[in-house]
């Protein structure tokens, strides 16, 4: 078993015991720096990162292979990567980039195939001059989304 496979197995075992947490990204550099990024259905607490870090530390032997370890939650400005992340962010505002446009909209619904976004836009009136505010709703398949980031409003 390679070093990476061993770490991945330890991570999977650890996350089985924490069903609200899920793995977003996991890398090991050539210098054996292990980076683990987590997210959770209810967020990620500091204790969650400590627990995952300890599980990895306790199951690897530094005498066999020296390594450095970083376990963190995904940042607030990090793009959403998994369907599970979209589902947990229903009701929040996203900036969604597609191949043709950028949309800032509320995430109304997320299922396994697509997301439903809702926003208001100013468009030319159908009759007469000027613009009017219209409510737009679009179902966007995940395959059409290049990047989606949760925005924070204060």
Image (cartoon, helix red, strand yellow):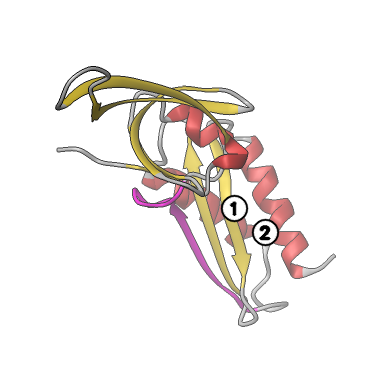
Q: Is residue 13 left or right of residue 27?
A: right
Mark number displayed over residue 108:
none
User: Which quadrant does the C terminus fall into?
Assistant: top left
Label 1: how many residues lie within 10 Å, few (<14), some (14-19) or many (20+)? some
Q: Is residue 37 left or right of residue 121?
A: right
Q: Residue at x 33, y 29 (%)?
A: 92
Q: Residue at x 48, y 42 (%)?
A: 39
Res 134 → quadrant: top left
Q: Residue at x 57, y 28 (%)?
A: 114
The residue positioned farthest toward the front in the image shown: 128
Q: SS at mark 1?
A: helix
Q: SS at mark 2?
A: helix
Kindly check if marks 1 and 2 are in contact, taking CB atoms under 8 A apart as contact. yes
Res 45 → quadrant: top left
Q: Residue at x 59, y 75 (%)?
A: 67
Residue 60 is situated, as x and y percent measured from the top left of the image, at 67, 65
Q: Is residue 34 magenta?
A: no
Label 2: how many residues lie within 10 Å, few (<14), some (14-19) or many (20+)? few
Residue 119 is situated, as x and y percent measured from the top left of the image, at 31, 26
Q: Look at mark 2 in the image and give the residue it sits on.
A: 59
115 to 80, vertically: above or below: above
Q: Is residue 70 magenta?
A: yes
Provide the residue span drawn in magenta.
66-79
Front position in the image: 80 or 26? 80
The residue positioned farthest toward the bottom in the image shown: 31
132 to 32, vertically: above or below: above
Q: Is residue 80 left or right of residue 128?
A: right
Residue 124 is situated, as x and y percent measured from the top left of the image, at 24, 28
Front position in the image: 73 or 87? 87
121 to 32, vertically: above or below: above
Mark number displayed over residue 55:
1
């Amino acid at each position: 078993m390679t070093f990476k496979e061993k770490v991945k197995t330890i991570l999977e075992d650890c996350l089985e015991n924490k069903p609200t947490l899920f793995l977003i990204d996991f890398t090991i550099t050539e210098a054996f720096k292990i980076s683990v990024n987590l997210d959770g259905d209810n967020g990620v607490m500091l204790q969650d990162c400590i627990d995952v870090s300890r599980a990895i530390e306790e199951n690897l032997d530094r005498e066999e292979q020296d390594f450095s370890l970083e376990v963190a939650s995904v940042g607030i400005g990090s793009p959403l990567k998994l369907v599970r992340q979209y589902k947990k962010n229903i009701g929040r505002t996203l900036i969604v980039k597609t191949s043709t446009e950028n949309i800032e909209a509320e995430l109304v619904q997320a299922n396994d195939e697509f997301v439903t976004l809702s926003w208001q836009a100013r468009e030319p009136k159908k009759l007469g001059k000027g613009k009017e505010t219209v409510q737009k709703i679009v179902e966007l398949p995940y395959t059409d989304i290049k990047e989606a980031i949760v925005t924070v409003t204060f």
